[in-house]
Image (cartoon, rainbow, N blue to C red):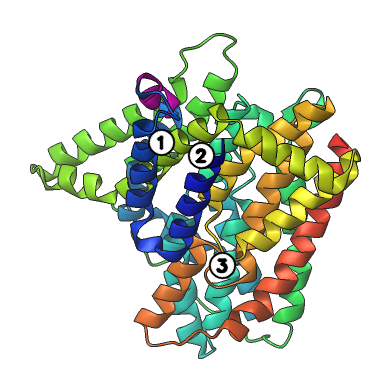
Amino acid sequence: MVLALILFALTYILLLVLPDYRYLIALCSAAVFILTGILPAQNALGAINWNVIMMLAGTMIVVQLFIESRMPARLSEWLLTVVPNVCWAVVALSLFAGFISAFVDNVATVLMVAPIGLSVAKQLNINPVPVIISIAVSSNLQGAATLVGDTTSILLGSYLNMNFNDFFYMLGKPGICLAVELGAVATVFVLLWLFRKEKQHVDTEVTTVVTDYVPSVLMVGTVVLLIAASMLKSKPELTNGYICMALALIGTVRACIKERSYSACIRMLKSVDFQTLLLLSGLFMVIEGITQAGVIDAIAQLFVKIAGTSVFGIYTLIVFTSVVLSAFIDNIPYVATMLPVVTGIASLMGVPPYLFAFGLLSGATLGGNLTPVGASANIAGIGILQKDGYEVSTRDFMRIGIPFTLVAVMVGYVTLWVIWG
């Protein structure tokens, strides 16, 4: 167990120090686990959750088609025609980004909505930095609301065998979605306060022309079919992955036929973030290795030792530890690592794992909003601003990120305890 723990710690340190090479580090670590015999070679491929990998790959392609259709830009423009002033425009764009991110990857959401926020800020001659930051932090928040909203949600759903509907209602109780949405409602008041001085009138028209409605159908179809599949009592293990990949294939083939070229196929393949898929594959194997070595059980016992036998104490420790750590490290490897830990803690205490797992997801998702580097969506938003010549200081980001995060975390923390505690 000592060797597995040392390898795991070294892996995590390298993931933090060398973020550009995370996928290589994860794969190399998995290889070491196999070569040392900690993870039997015959169990390596079986440790990878192929349903998660296929869901992510398929969704990435559908999102790319959706972006190319220009439907997100048109929806954003329409949204701005119904708000009275700049303050409410920022709130509307943030809520819109949050709604999209409940069904689409957070980074993709920022890439869809941030350009609209940038153009609105330029049109009204206001600083676009706080506008884009608000869009980014809102997209991070609601990624935890549904099974397909974020990679971490997919990891949670897969690990606990939760279907799409379980995020809304499971075991006779509201799922994690309610806590996330109540947190989102609370953050509206934070944004209204932060932008209380921006009362300029918004004057815009819907000018974007949607070039293709089929990607929108595919996007909606992904959600509808995942919901339908969740209602099946018995289904193949890779059902969700098959759905996402099939719709991605349909969209790609159609794009090739429409353009009469294979360039669309190449473009869709480039839209897939293979590094993230390889990173997750490597982490799945590493986590299986440390689980078999007994490391996960040891960490679970450490949490119990720190917080005692109090369910509330351990829940509180999980939530706020996740918030702090996710402010500085990527939440994907963190959640992938901690899911076996929190379920192990629940097993030791003889309680269902849902409270601890939901607390882990909410804390890890929201903690990324504390700093500019805490989440990929933040980095994407800042990149858009920098590309346009705007500098974003840590102070600029934290002025919005800290109050936004604290309010959302506390509301979600209390809601989850009331329902699941």
Dot 2 corresponds to which residue? Answer: 4
The reply to whether dot 3 and dot 2 touch (C-beta < 8 Å) is no
Left/right placement of residue 387 relative to residue 419 reads: left
* Foreground of the two, 207 or 350: 350
Choose top left, top right, bottom left or bottom right for residue 81.
Answer: bottom right
Name which residue lies at 40% across and 81% down: 386
What secondary structure is found at the residue carrying circle 3?
Answer: helix
Q: Which residues are magenta?
A: 42-48
The reply to whether dot 1 and dot 2 touch (C-beta < 8 Å) is yes
Dot 1 corresponds to which residue? Answer: 33
Quarter of the picture containing the N terminus is: top right
Marks 3 and 2 sit apart, C-alpha to C-alpha, by 40 Å
Dot 3 corresponds to which residue? Answer: 135
Name which residue lies at 23% across and 44% down: 269
Residue 208 point in image, percent of width and height: 37, 64
Name which residue lies at 15% across and 40% down: 256
